[in-house]
Amino acid sequence: VEIGHNGVTPESCWLVDELSVAVPTKGIKYIFPCKCWLAKDRGDGLTVRLLNVLDSSTINIIRKVIYSITVVTGDTQYAGTDTNIFLTVYGVNGSTEEMLLPKNGDRFERDQEDTFTLEIDDIAPLKKIRVRIDGSGCRPDWFLDRILMRNLTTEEEYLFTYENWLSKTKGPKRTKVCEQPAVVDEEEMVDKTNYIIQVQTSDVGGAGTDANVFLIVFGEYGDTGMLPLKEGTNRNKFERKSKDVFRIPEMLSLGELSKVRVWHDNKGPAPGWHLEYIDVKDETMDQMFRFPCNRWLAKGEDDGMIIRELACANNDSIDLSDKTKYEIATTTANTDNASTAENAWIVLEGRKARSKEFVLENKKKKFLCGATDTFEFSSKHLGEIAGICLGHISKDGKKVKKEVFWHVMEVVVTEMELGNKYFFHCDAQIPLTAKKDQFLTFECYKSVESFASKVRKLVPVKYEIIVITGDVKGGGTDANVSITIYGVNGDSGKRALKKKFRNLFERGQTDRFVLEMLDLGELLRVKVEHDGSSLNNGWFLECVEVTNMANSVTTIFQCGKWLDAHKADGEIYRVLYPRY
C-alpha cells in the first residue's frame, strides 16, 4: 500500500502512526504500522511511504456480502418521502445492525424504483426485514410498495412486499415500523402469528411497579423489536402477585424462542419491580415458552439493575446425564467398486468421553454406490464430537481372502436430543479386515450447533468492562457513554456505562463496570458510543477490555481514536474487533 501527500509547506507535515485497510468481503482488516513523518522538513524528508503487506497484522472482522437493494415506492398521492429510512435484515445466521438507506438526489419518490448496493453481514438465507422511518423532513410519511434484495455472489433473490403506509397519520396501521417476511419462489420464509405475553409479578413486599415496562423477545428468526407493555388485562398493571396478559397480534413468528430482554424506565413514585416470570405463547405453533426471573429490577435492590435478560426454561427438561442417541449417516462414493457387502464399525471421539465400538450392520443392501445410509446408537453423552475411527470388517468374522475396500465419502454424526451435527470428510478407501485392528481416523471439519443447544448455554454471567480513556489533551468526556457487546450467542443490547459518585471517562483514567447478561459466548465485537450531550463531549478512547467473570476469559478491543463530532472523521461511535 502506498500512502502520501502532495504538500510542500511546513504546515503540511504529517505523522502517520498506522494505516488500516478493511476488506469486508473477505472478513479481514489489515493493520500497517508506519510511525513515520510524511514531510519535506521532518525525518528523511519523504512525503510518500510504501507499506508492505508482509509487515502488517490482521484482524478478523465480520464477513460482508454485497447485495443489490431495489426499493419501490408506491404509486399513490404523496407516496414519496424525505424522511430517514432504516433497514435491519434477519437471516438464519443472525441479523444486521440497523442501516440507514442512502438518500441521494431524488430517491424514494412516488412510483419510483431506486437501486443501490449494500454490504451486509453474511447471514443468508434471509428470513425477514424490519423497515423503520424516523418521521423527519418536510415529507415524513412514506408509502412503501416492496423491497427486492439480490445476493450479487449467489444471485439469490428475496422479495419483501408491504404495499402500505409507514406513517403516524396515514393508512390503517399508523406505524413507523414494519416487518415483512422474505418470499422465495412465492413461498414465505416466516409464518405470521399472535403472541400472548403473560407477566407474573412476585408475591413479595413492594414487588409492584409504577414504571413503564418494555420487552424484546428473541428466537430462531431474530427478535420482535421493542414491545411497550401498555394495554393488558389489568388497568393497574404490574401489581404485587398479579398476572398481566398482553396480546401482540399479527407478528412474524420467531420460531423456537431463546430469551427475553425486559426492562423499565424507572419512572413513577414506586418504580422498583420484583418479577417472577414471563410466559410467551406462539398461537400458530400452539406452544408456550417460560422465562423465569425471580429477581428485582430496581435501583435500590439486588445489583441495582433495571434490565434483565431471561433464558427460556423449556430446554431444561432435556436430560443428558443418562444415555444420548446418536445418528450416524454414511455416504458411499458414487464410483465403480466403491460399495461393500460387508459390515463397518465406528468409534466416536468426544471432548468428554470415547464411545464403544458401534457396528454398522450391512442389512438390506446398504453401502451401495452413491447411497447414504443411517444408523442409530445410544451411548453416554460424549460432549462435542472431535473425531471418529472408521473400520471395515467382514461379517461373522470370516477370513479375508482378497483385498476388498469400501470407499466412503462422508460421515455425519447427529446428537438426536439436541440436534447438533458433526461433519467428517473422508473420501477414503477402507480395507476389509477380519478383526477390528485396522481403521482410519478422521477429524471433524465442520459442526453445526442446533438452536436448542445454543439456548442451553444461555446462563446469566457477569462481565467486567474496563474502559481506558487516552492520556491526550481534551481526551475526557462528560457525555453519556454506552456499550453493546456482540458474541456468538447474540448481543447485550445497548447498556449505559454509569456509576454513582464518580467522574467517569477523564483523561488517562481507567473506569470499571460490572454488567450481568446471558452468556454471549466467544466475543466478536463491541460498539462503544456516546450521546454528544454536554459541552465537553469529545472523547479519546484508548481501549476496552471485557472479561467473562465466570471463566476469566478477557477480550481486548483496541481503539486509539476520537469519538468527536468535530475531530478526525466526526463519528461519535466506534465498532471495535478483538486483537489477538
Image (spheres, helix red, strand yellow):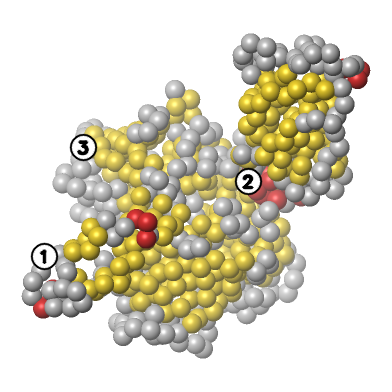
- Secondary element at image label 1: loop
Count neighbours of disc 2 (C-alpha within 10 A) and say few if under 14, some if 14 to 19, many if 20 or more. Answer: many
**Mark linked to residue 110:** 3
Q: In this view of the protein, which residue sits in the foreground, 138 or 393?
A: 393
Query: At which x and y percent is residue 265?
Result: 51, 69
Q: Amino acid at mark 2?
A: Leu
3 or 1: tag closer to the N-terminus: 1
Taking 323 as reference, is 185 above or below it? above
**Mark linked to residue 257:** 2
Taking 339 as reference, is 553 above or below it? below
Residue at 56% x, 39% y: name it.
253
Q: In this view of the protein, which residue sits in the foreground, 549 or 481?
A: 549
In the picture of the structure, the residue carrying the numbered disc 1 is 6
1 or 2: tag closer to the N-terminus: 1
Query: At which x and y percent is residue 552?
Result: 65, 69
Q: In this view of the protein, which residue sits in the foreground, 445 or 48?
A: 48
Between the residue at mark 3 and the residue at mark 1, the CA separation in whole angstroms equals 46 Å
Taking 405 as reference, is 293 above or below it? below
Q: Amino acid at mark 3?
A: Arg
Q: In this view of the protein, which residue sits in the foreground, 316 or 337?
A: 337
